[in-house]
């Protein structure tokens, strides 16, 4: 679809997907569900295509029908499409350089006399 919009229609917009930290887990579940559905739909399509070819291997149209079934199943998997993120998860991003929060907390505890002595 992007290729078609960019090359043929010349109206491609460079939108970026943004997911907030609170919604990231929901996004991750939805993306995982989409990938699982896509694999299962394609597996079912290949099974039907193999079944068609096994039933009638002499007919040339059987191979065409098999490709059509696989394509149809792939298009069905795109009904629940969830785009992929191009960046890492918010919790997995690199921390800014400098001392860690744990080191700051230890220093703060030592200053207040809470170091356990």
Image (tube, grey):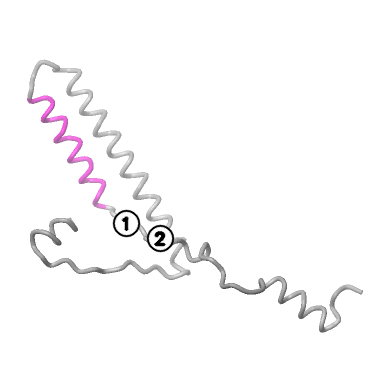
Q: Magenta segment range?
A: 61-79
In depth, the one of 84 and 10 nearer the eye is 10
**Residue at the image position 20 percent from the left and 36 percent from the top:** 70
Position above or below: 93 against 75: below
Instruction: List the residue tagged with mark 2.
Output: 27
Asked if marks 2 and 1 touch (Cβ < 8 Å), the reply is yes
**Residue at the image position 22 percent from the left and 40 percent from the top:** 73
What x and y, as percent, mark residue 44?
A: 28, 33
What x and y, as percent, mark residue 77?
A: 26, 46
Q: Quadrant of residue 24?
A: bottom left
34 sits to left or right of 116: left
Instruction: List the residue tagged with mark 1.
Output: 82
Position above or below: 40 against 89: above
111 sits to left or right of 57: right
Q: Quadrant of the C terminus?
A: bottom right
In depth, the one of 99 and 37 nearer the eye is 99
Taking the magenta stretch, the answer to whether it contains residue 72 is yes
Give the structural element (helix, strand or loop) at label 2: helix
Q: Which numbered disc flags the more N-terminal residue, 2 or 1? A: 2
In depth, the one of 6 and 91 nearer the eye is 6
Q: CA distance from mark 2 to mark 1?
A: 8 Å
Q: Residues within 10 Å of mark 1 (few under 14, many from 20)?
A: some
Q: Residues within 10 Å of mark 2 (few under 14, many from 20)?
A: some
């Amino acid at each position: 679809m992007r290729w078609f919009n960019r090359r043929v229609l010349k109206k491609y917009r460079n939108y970026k997907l943004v997911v907030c930290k609170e919604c990231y887990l929901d996004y991750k579940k939805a993306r995982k569900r989409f990938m699982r559905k896509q694999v299962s739909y394609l597996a079912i399509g290949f099974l039907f295509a193999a079944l068609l070819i096994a039933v009638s291997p002499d007919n040339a149209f059987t191979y065409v029908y098999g490709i059509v079934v696989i394509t149809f199943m792939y298009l069905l998997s795109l009904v629940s499409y969830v785009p992929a993120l191009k960046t890492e998860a918010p919790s997995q991003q690199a921390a800014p350089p400098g001392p860690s929060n744990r080191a700051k907390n230890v220093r703060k505890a030592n200053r207040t006399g809470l170091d356990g002595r």
